[in-house]
Amino acid sequence: NQIMESLKNLCGGTVGAILTCPLEVVKTRLQSSSVTLYISEVQLNTMAGASVNRVVSPGPLHCLKVILEKEGPRSLFRGLGPNLVGVAPSRAIYFAAYSNCKEKLNDVFDPDSTQVHMISAAMAGMNV
């Protein structure tokens, strides 16, 4: 039973890492110094008829579009391997600790109450 629970937790951590990987790639690109590759210029007309160039920071959707166009969909999963090596086991440990704490605290507080969930989450977070 404990092994099945650990496998479920490992799978949950793995799926979570896979689903959030593209968001992490976009976030990292927006934060990195190479973001200048994705900056576009906007031309503004002044009252006198002259034009002024202004640099505009790209948004997440623009960054995602550029990544997909220039590098392809596979690039959204760069760094997934090392992430899985670290994230999946830590999520498995977290959820195992959470389940154990919850099981013990259900005897102390009202079963499955808000206190049980919050204290179990805090204790599990300290264990990881």
Image (cartoon, rainbow, N blue to C red):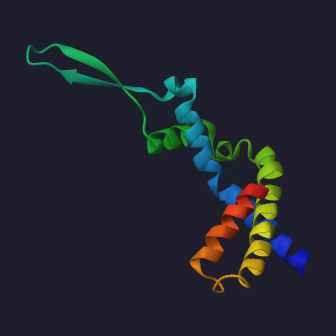
Disc tally is: 0
- In this picture, residue 43 sits left or right of residue 9: left
- In this picture, residue 20 sits left or right of residue 39: right
Q: Residue at x 70, y 56 (%)?
A: 18
Pick the front one: 120 or 70: 120
77 over 8 or under it: above or below: above
Judged from this view, the residue extending furthest toward the front is: 108
Quick one: quadrant of the C terminus? bottom right
Quick one: quadrant of the N terminus? bottom right
42 over 30 or under it: above or below: above
Pick the front one: 15 or 72: 15
Q: Residue at x 45, y 45 (%)?
A: 61
- In this picture, residue 20 sits left or right of residue 49: right
71 over 95 or under it: above or below: above
Q: Residue 122 at what x, y percent from top left?
A: 67, 62
Judged from this view, the residue extending furthest toward the left is: 47
